[in-house]
Amino acid sequence: MAYVLVTLLLLGTWLFCLIDVLQTDSSEMRHLSKTGWFVVTLFGFLLGALLWLLDGRPRRSAPARRTMWTRMAADGPIGPDDDPAFLSELERRLRGDDVP
C-alpha cells in the first residue's frame, strides 16, 4: 500500500510540473525555453520535475493569479462589516437618528 501512495505522489508531482510548464508564460521562464523545459520535465521524470520546481519556475514577488478573494477585495468590500457607508448608516440607525 505504501508503494502505491509513493507512486501516486511522484506521478502527481510530475503531472503538476508538466501542466505548470505548459501554463507558465514563455517570458517568465528561466534558463530554457518553454519547449526546453517541457522536454526536460517530460523525459527527466522526477529529476526534470525537481529541476523545474527549483530552477525553471518563475519567482513571483506578488501573486500573478488573482483568486476569488483578491478580486473581491480589489473590487470593493467583501462583507457589510467592511463597508464604511454601511457601518455609518448602521451607527446612525442605532442612535435613533432615522426616527422622524
Image (cartoon, grey):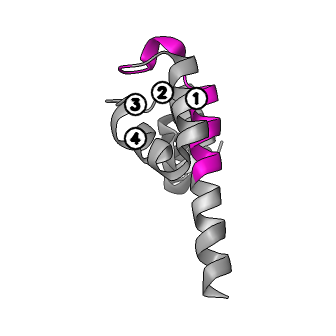
Mark 4 or 3: in front is 4
User: Closer to the N terminus: mark 4 or mark 1?
Assistant: 1
Q: CA distance from mark 2 to mark 1?
A: 25 Å
Give the secondary structure at mark 1. helix
Residue at position x 42%, y 47% in the image: 50
Is residue 20 located in the magenta-colored stretch of the structure?
A: yes
Whether pointer 2 and pointer 3 mark residues with C-beta atoms closer than 8 Å, the reply is: no
Q: Which mark is residue 51?
A: 4
**Mark 3 packing: few (<14 Cα in 10 Å), some, or many (20+)?**
many
Up-down relation of residue 55 to residue 91 (above or below): above
Mark 2 vs 3, N-terminal side: 3
Q: Earlier in the sequence, mark 2 or mark 1?
A: 1
Region in magenta: 14-31
| Residue 6 drawn at (x, y percent) | 58, 74
Please, what is the three-letter code of the amino acid marked with disc 1?
Answer: Val
- Majority secondary structure of the magenta segment? helix
Q: Which residue is mark 2?
A: 64
Q: Nearer the viewer, residue 94 or 87?
A: 87
* Contact flag, marks 4 and 3 (Cβ < 8 Å): yes
Residue identifier under label 1: 39
Check disc 4 and give the amino acid type.
Leu
Q: Is residue 55 above or below residue 12?
A: above
Quadrant holding the N terminus: bottom right
Report the number of numbered marks. 4
Q: Earlier in the sequence, mark 4 or mark 3?
A: 4
Q: Residue furthest bottom?
A: 1
Relative vertical location of residue 3 with respect to residue 47 in this rendering, above or below:
below
- Residue at the limit of the structure toward the top, as seen here: 27
